Image (spheres, rainbow, N blue to C red):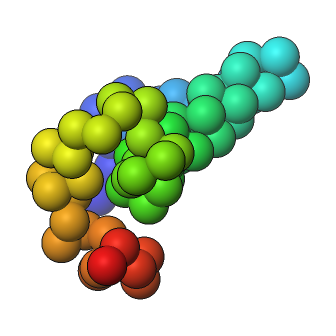
Amino acid sequence: MTSPVAGKAGAPALDLSGAKAALWLSSTAFLALLVLYFVGLDQGATSIFGSDTHLHEFLHDARHLLGFPCH
């Protein structure tokens, strides 16, 4: 099949500068570490919510699925 307009392909290529790529990389790494903290490390003495265990109980099955021991 040919496209109706000669020389035009599907989507244009992304042109990311080094600074924009570094921003995306650092943002993604920060988000990944934040998720890792809440799923794997937020319990007991290291909890940012004190002795409240609602977050721990909400993520309990995900903790075991990812291999984090919690009891």
Rendered location of residue 6, percent (x, y)? 46, 32
Rendered location of residue 65, percent (x, y)? 29, 80
Q: Residue at x 31, y 79 (%)?
A: 71
In the rendered structure, the answer to whether residue 27 lies left or right of residue 37 reads right
Residue 1 shows in this picture: yes
Image mark count:
0
Q: Quadrant of residue 4?
A: top left
| Above or below 16: residue 64 | below
Q: Residue at x 40, y 79 (%)?
A: 69
Nearest the eye: 19 or 6: 19
Extreme-right residue of the structure: 18
| Above or below 48: residue 61 | below
In the rendered structure, the answer to whether residue 25 lies left or right of residue 37 reads right
Nearest the eye: 20 or 5: 20
Q: Residue at x 70, y 30 (%)?
A: 26
**The N terminus: image quadrant:** bottom left
Residue 66 shows in this picture: no
Q: Residue at x 48, y 55 (%)?
A: 41
Rendered location of residue 8, percent (x, y)? 47, 31
Rendered location of residue 70, percent (x, y)? 35, 73
| Above or below 70: residue 22 | above
Nearest the eye: 60 or 65: 60
| Above or below 3: residue 66 | below
Q: Quadrant of residue 23?
A: top right
